Amino acid sequence: METPRIRPCSADDLPVLQDIERAGGLAFHGVGMPEIADDAPPSLDDLARYQEDGRAWVALDADDRPRAYLLVDLVDGAAHIEQVTVHPDLARRGVGRALIEHVAEWAAGRGLRALTLTTFSDVPWNAPYYARCGFRALTDDELTPGLRAIRRHEAELGLDRWPRICMRREL
């Protein structure tokens, strides 16, 4: 597949992002994480906040339909990838990487020093994938206050039932 066209998310895209999230989440059934697979997608209100703030992008298929998306928060001087999901129909074709590279350019253009994210360490399309995209796992003493707060919130949501890590890629 050629490099997908990426554009800012529009308000009309928001329900489609929920569909992409539902479809993308199904893969977690195959790694013994049904709670993650069956988790509800972000609400339309939550997605709208990212879209209205200019912190949401979509990757389009050949028919100009959104088939992947990425959301960013600003955390301690870094662009924190809150969510990146690719529809299974386009998985393993470089779409997620293209979104990450797009956001890296966006962040660098705003003087941000890094990309960060939190992810499952043992899921092949999570931490190992991000390592191939140039991210490295952070040690506990490298966590910024904002990343510590994110990890506490994730623990409250029950995500720590499976090993999770914070990762960073310098820009």
Image (cartoon, rainbow, N blue to C red):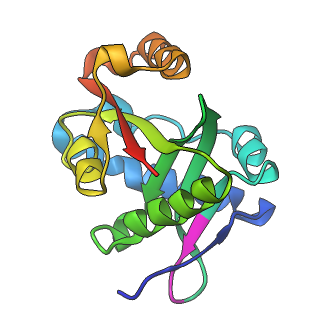
Residue 52: x and y in percent read: 82, 51
Position of 140 compared to 103: left or right? left
Where 48 falls versus 165 (above or below)?
Answer: below
For this rendering, which residue is in front, 161 or 136?
Answer: 136
Position of 127 compared to 19: left or right? left
Res 32 quadrant in image: top left
Magenta stretch bounds: 58-62
Residue 22: x and y in percent read: 47, 50
For this rendering, which residue is in front, 140 or 89?
Answer: 140
For this rendering, which residue is in front, 148 or 92?
Answer: 148
Position of 28 compared to 58: left or right? left
Res 136 quadrant in image: top left
Secondary structure predominantly adopted by residues drawn in magenta: strand
Image quarter in which the N terminus is found: bottom left
For residue 61: magenta?
A: yes
Where 110 falls versus 41 (above or below)?
Answer: below
Task: Identify the residue at image location x=53%, y=37%.
Answer: 40
Res 3 quadrant in image: bottom left
Residue 135: x and y in percent read: 32, 46
Residue 20: x and y in percent read: 50, 58
